[in-house]
Amino acid sequence: MTKREGLPSLTEPNATAEPSAGGKPAAAGLSGIALVVVLTGYALSIVDASIVNVALTPISDDLHGGPAALELVVSGYGLTYALGLVLGGRLGDAFGRRRLYAYGLAAFTLTSALCGLAPTIEFLVGARLLQGAAAAMLVPQVLATIQASTEGAARARAIGMYGVTAALGMVVGQILGGLLVSLDVGGIGWRSVFAINVPIGVAALLAVRRVPATRADTKPGFDPAGTVLFGLTMVCVLAVVVAGPDLGWPLWLWSLLVVAAAGALALVRTESGLEARGGSPLLSPSVLSRPGTRRGLAAVVPFSAGFGAFLFVYALLAQGHFGFDGLASGAVLTPFAVGFFAVAMFTPKIAAALGGRIVTLGAGVQGLGLVELALVIRLGWPHPSLPLVLLGIALFGVGAALIGPTLFRMVLADVPPAQAGMGSGVLVTSQQMATALGATIGGTLYVSLADWLSTSAAAVLVLAVLTCLSVIVLVISLKLPDPR
């Protein structure tokens, strides 16, 4: 159960009426404008994860940053982002989701400006770390607000648009970054990839009062032990994912996974004990163990890992073998974007007709696209048919559109509105971690195989692994409940 929360003077004049106790969330509680506002902040956070990739060379030339510093410009954002998502969602439950969204968006806009003004590479790395933390504050509030203020068809449409934003943001970041650097807008070069966030962020802030203000009826208590254990586990896993490729996967790095496993076990015991004593754990075992949430998260992990690996390996192949620049390689993903967007618009209706089998259908279509790509590359190398490659990419996008938004709905359907922030944080953290892990493992596997075999053989084998992940999602989907 949620209740409306007031904001400082920013939103007091237009505060929304408080729902009656025990009442259901009104589908009209989240207007079209409000949805655009919260999705704007989410889109900025997604785009900024990839937009900087095509600007690394000019950043290095201007600020004289070495490879390690440039790696931190990219990965530092992801580190603080992933680390803060669950805590950000919990703070939204406690102090109000609109308030945390507004504060997070304001911080994101400010840190974007600092990135664009960075005089040294060290300053840029620090600003990127802060930018990731700001994103972690605002992002969990998006799904939590949708969960707490909509129901039925309105919720399905809103989560569908959330899924579209997530998928297209990754592609748009690559295209937009290349375009801005190429055009050299205002003569500021690479700084434009950060400066563009400022007017968009300010515009969204001016309209944030249109977002319904929700929070938990009872403010959850602080869980210091759970927070520390969760942070320790995340840091160890992220260190392996981020540093592994550059360090060559030394044995001591793998030992961090043992620490992470021990931390995860201690976290489960700590949270279960705290909840049994009537406390308020950072991660509620009773909520996360519900069938829809548990099985949905189990499917989100292989789905997101496959998604991350596909985009990363595709970028390596497009820019390495075919010689595309960042802008061109992003543009070739247009069929993915079109297919995803077109199908996502009808996902609620398809889900109403097929129920949980929509994920089964999506996994089948995605697997078909991957098999088609593998055959095209294997039989047509070194000049595979571009139309057939685009067809495979489009099928992958269609499958992702059927799977992603539906899984988001399933995961959150069993989460009480009072804990929507926590549920959203766990979902986005799982998604981001699996995406990063997929990109790292997929990229490492592709590069290793390409050195040992051939480029075409490496690409085909990686596509075969991704097809196996689609099969895993398909198998899990057979026991998923119908989306609500």
Image (spheres, helix red, strand yellow):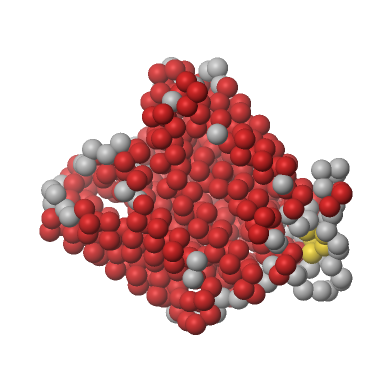
> In terms of depth relative to the viewer, which is nearer, 16 or 459?
16
- Tally the marks: 0
264 vs 287, left or right, is left
Q: Residue at x 73, y 54 (%)?
A: 211
Q: Residue at x 61, y 28 (%)?
A: 113
Q: Quadrant of the C terminus?
A: bottom right
Measuring from the top left, give residue 317's x and y in whole percent: 26, 45
> In terms of depth relative to the viewer, which is nearer, 471 or 371?
371
Q: Residue at x 44, y 36 (%)?
A: 177
Q: Is residue 381 visible?
A: yes
Which of the 4 image quarters holds residue 251?
top left
Q: Residue at x 48, y 76 (%)?
A: 350
Q: Quadrant of the N terminus?
A: bottom right
261 vs 445, left or right, is right
Measuring from the top left, give residue 140's x and y in whole percent: 64, 53
Which of the 4 image quarters holds residue 417?
bottom right
Measuring from the top left, give residue 424's x and y in whole percent: 63, 58
| Residue found farthest to the bottom | 353
180 vs 123, left or right, is left
> In terms of depth relative to the viewer, which is nearer, 232 or 197?
197
Measuring from the top left, give residue 406's x and y in whole percent: 52, 69
As displayed, is residue 420 above or below residue 253?
A: below
Q: Is residue 128 visible?
A: no
